[in-house]
Image (cartoon, rainbow, N blue to C red):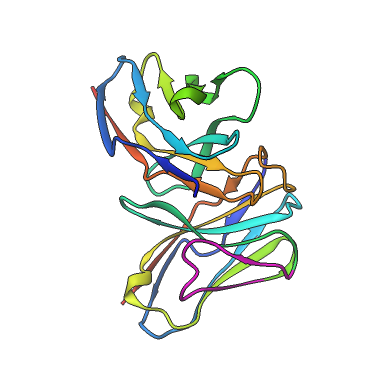
Amino acid sequence: DVKVTQSSRYLVKRTGEKVFLECVQDMDHENMFWYRQDPGLGLRLIYFSYDVKMKEKGDIPEGYSVSREKKERFSLILESASTNQTSMYLCASSPGQVAGNTIYFGEGSWLTVV
Amino acid sequence: AQSVTQPDIHITVSEGASLELRCNYSYGATPYLFWYVQSPGQGLQLLLKYFSGDTLVQGIKGFEAEFKRSQSSFNLRKPSVHWSDAAEYFCAVRTSNTGKLIFGQGTTLQVKP
């Protein structure tokens, strides 16, 4: 089975803190994604990556950055956390660049910024 | 721009009743379409997907979906709902040129005993 692991399930951080959300996949997938999920808005893409050291902005990249130094790991960084970044964050991965390939999701990280 | 609309935010059905969740997409070419389910506090699990061939697609847990190009729809159906089907359901479209998965707003399914 494909495993996408988000190391932190629940975090509480203070406004202005730097926050790292880590994601690891064990299936040698080329593509990795970070989504944000909010009630009534569905899932919105923050950043995605097609390869190591490669990244592209999604629909809501403001206030976020990402890092992909190794193929299996994709980190989401909040440089200075704000209360409007309180949300559920979902990491995902998929093989290759064929659009029909399934995207596999982690269990999510609940972030509260106070 | 590509988009996905799930017109029903919340649906309640009785256990044993049939279910249909609606999904409409906007995309110029043939889309790659997905349905995911999310149980409370969990990640998303793929129910089924369509990218070519037969327009009626079978998925896990007894779900099926039908792709109708003329209506730009990909509705999810189940003939008899079980209490364990209570969850949030997301329709998504993936474009061939970017590989991004674009989601609808989600439909929350409540099952009455």
**Is B57 one of the magenta-colored residues?**
no
Front one among B74 and B61: B74
Location of residue A80 in the rendering, given as x and y in whole percent from the top left corner: 44, 83
Answer left or right for B54 relative to A37.
right
- State which region is magenta: A53-67
**Is A61 one of the magenta-colored residues?**
yes
Q: Which residue is drawn at 29% across and 19% down?
A: B15
Location of residue B36 in the rendering, given as x and y in whole percent from the top left corner: 49, 37
Answer left or right for B63 relative to A82.
right
Q: Residue at x 40, y 86 (%)?
A: A16
Give the position of the C terminus of chain B as an image quadrant: top left
Q: Which residue is drawn at 36% across and 68% down?
A: A86
Q: How many marks?
A: 0
Q: In this view, does B58 lie above or below A25?
A: above
Q: Is residue B53 above or below residue A79?
A: above
- The quarter holding residue B90 reads top left
Q: Main secondary structure of the magenta part?
A: loop
Among all residues in the image, which is located at the extreme bottom? A16
Q: In this view, does B58 lie above or below B99?
A: above
Front one among B72 and B57: B72
